[in-house]
Image (cartoon, helix red, strand yellow):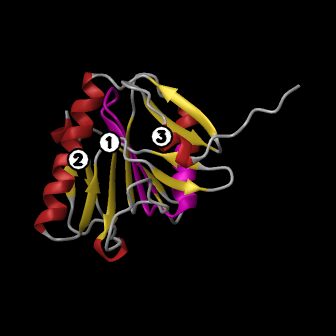
Amino acid sequence: MGETSLMTAEALLRLNLPDKRSELIRGRLVVRDPGGARHGAVANRIAYRITAHVEAHALGRVYAAETGFKIESDPDTVRAPDVAFIARHRLPEVEPLGYPGWAPDLAVEVLAHDDHPAETLEKIAQWLKAGVRLVWVVDSEKRTSRVYRADGSEALLGMHDTLDGEDVVPGFRCPLVDLW
């Protein structure tokens, strides 16, 4: 039996897979089809609201969907949330051309039609282990969101509840109903 060679973050950066979403999980390439219309619309609404708040208050930088972050090395893991936020005091003077070697402060995942619950939980665990302070998982089908915090606490939000940036994105609040 031959051993499967593991891919590096650098090799992933050079890989050209048009119209696909790709991540690297412990050196193994994961390729998926693009999200559907609802996924894209909800991810955009969240990104728009976070960006407007962050820029109005000079809190840091917001990254669009599919921006990869190298959160593990040897073997490499590159994850790409639907929206990411990095606080101003953590931003480098010059952003890297490749994948940043750090995790964002906030990672937002909007569930897509082909997301598997076990894979989503693995991604949340990797984000938190890498230092993400707040993870929001938005389910546009059920119109709910789960909030995961670095301290291990979590909350389920219903369609009439509000996403809160807490101390990660100070002052940010977005009623879930505004996302649909």
Q: Nearer the viewer, mark 1 or mark 2?
A: 1
Task: Say which of 47 and 93 sits in front.
Answer: 93
Distance of mark 3 from mark 2, alpha carbons? 26 Å
Mark 1 is surrounded, within 10 Å at the Cα level, by few (under 14), some (14 to 19) or many (20 or more) other residues, namely some
Report the amino acid beneath label 3: Arg
Say which quadrant the N terminus sits in: top right
- Residue extending furthest toward the right: 1
Measured in 3D between alpha carbons, the distance from the residue under mark 1 to the one under mark 3, in whole angstroms, is 18 Å
Residues at marks 1 and 2 touching, judged by CB atoms closer than 8 Å = yes
Label 2: which secondary element: helix
Closer to the camera in the image, 170 or 104: 104
Q: Which residue is mark 1?
A: 65
Tell me which segment is drawn in magenta: 123-148
Q: Which residue is mark 2?
A: 47
Q: Nearer the viewer, mark 1 or mark 3?
A: 3
The spot of residue 108 in percent (x, y) is 36, 47
**Residue 91 versus residue 148 in the image, above or below:** below
Label 3: few (<14), some (14–19) or many (≥20) C-alpha neighbours in 10 Å: few
Label 3: element kind: helix
Mark 1 / mark 2, whichever is N-terminal: 2
- Residue assigned mark 3: 14
Question: Secondary structure under badge 1?
Answer: loop
